[in-house]
Amino acid sequence: METIKSAVVTGASRGIGLAVSRMLLKRGMRVYGLGRSFSTELADCPAFIPIVCDLSHTARLEETVRQIRRETRISLLVNNAGAGYFGPHEELNPRKIHEMTAVNLEAPMILTQLFLRDLKAERGTIINISSVTALQTNTHGCAYGAAKAGLTSFSRSLFEEVRKYGVRVAVIHPDMTATDFYRNAAFRESDEADARLLPEEVAEAAAWILSQREGMGVTEMTVRPQRHVISRKAKKKTEGESYGTT
Ligand SMILES: NC(=O)c1ccc[n+]([C@@H]2O[C@H](COP(=O)([O-])OP(=O)(O)OC[C@H]3O[C@@H](n4cnc5c(N)ncnc54)[C@H](OP(=O)(O)O)[C@@H]3O)[C@@H](O)[C@H]2O)c1
């Protein structure tokens, strides 16, 4: 088999996924990046292969995976793409709930299933980007938090299933990170350095997981800024109300 290792990174077009892709490219990997719209970022990097794909159309994922498997056998799958809509559950709609469930949970489970044979053959790694919301209750983020809790639960169980094949499974729980993730929310991350993470810092957490010796798996990692501060865009928080975040 080829000597250059290949990775699939979902949501590689921006934010944390772009930072993870850059980190992997620096480590000499070939990266198949999935997303709906790619800018010129990494356009001049031959080892980065952008694949336009809407992960909420889960029925089409098999064809995308076939396309990648015709070219390579991956040794790393990073399920990073995510969608978040926040607010009282009553104010969401079925389309948004479907999108969050499909992108945050269903697509990672389907991609894992479709790539698992290759990952076993490569004694590879799966890294799922979940969220601190998976570990807590999330007023105004019930559906997003439920999808992320599902992803964390999936990761924990999958590790138990595949550890005997040498496949490592890690789930990262980032707290608020400075990306464009909160464009649909009434709040965003703080601009203060000790109250938000940078996407490169989450990528560093992934790099640390990857750099551990074979035989030692880091199964979960939570990365948080020191202080909890959110910037509200419009609506004022009333007493006793807490915004589900990240
Ligand atoms: N930012 C935070 O505070 C934070 C905290 C905790 C966890 N997270 C998680 O971190 C991950 C990355 O988020 P981010 O902060 O980097 O946000 P972001 O800048 O909004 O990036 C989200 C990525 O997901 C992709 N994506 C979204 N919907 C997609 C779809 N239907 N099909 C294909 N790709 C899709 C986007 O690509 P396209 O738009 O090109 O499709 C983009 O590359 C997400 O899973 C998020 O839940 C973020």
Image: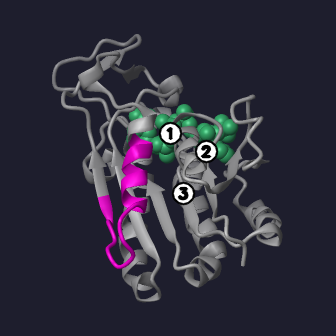
Kindly identify which residue carries mark 2: 11
Q: Quadrant of the N terminus?
A: bottom right
Residue at horizontal 40 percent and vertical 45 percent from the top: 204
Task: Answer yes or no: disc 2 within 8 Å of ligand 1.
Answer: yes
Mark 3 and mark 2: Cα distance apart in space:
9 Å
Q: Where does the image place residue 102, in percent across and percent down from the top left?
A: 59, 54
Residue at horizontal 25 percent and vertical 33 percent from the top: 225
Mark 1: which secondary structure?
Answer: helix
Relative to 175, residue 242 above or below: above
Mark 2: which secondary structure?
Answer: loop
Kindly identify which residue carries mark 3: 78
Give left or right: position of 160 versus 225: right
Mark 3: which secondary structure?
Answer: strand
Task: Answer yes or no: disc 1 within 8 Å of ligand 1.
Answer: yes
Q: Which disc is residue 16 wearing?
A: 1
The stretch of residues the image draws in magenta is 202-220
Mark 1 and mark 2: Cα distance apart in space:
8 Å
The verdict on residue 139 being magenta is no
Mark 1 and mark 3: Cα distance apart in space:
11 Å
First-in-chain label (1 vs 3): 1
**Is residue 19 visible to the viewer in this orientation of the structure?**
yes
Q: Residue 77 versus residue 184: which sits nearer the camera?
A: 77
The verdict on residue 203 being magenta is yes
Q: Residue 135 versus residue 200: which sits nearer the camera?
A: 200
**Residue density around tag 1, few if under 14, some if 14–19, many if 20 or more, within 10 Å:** many
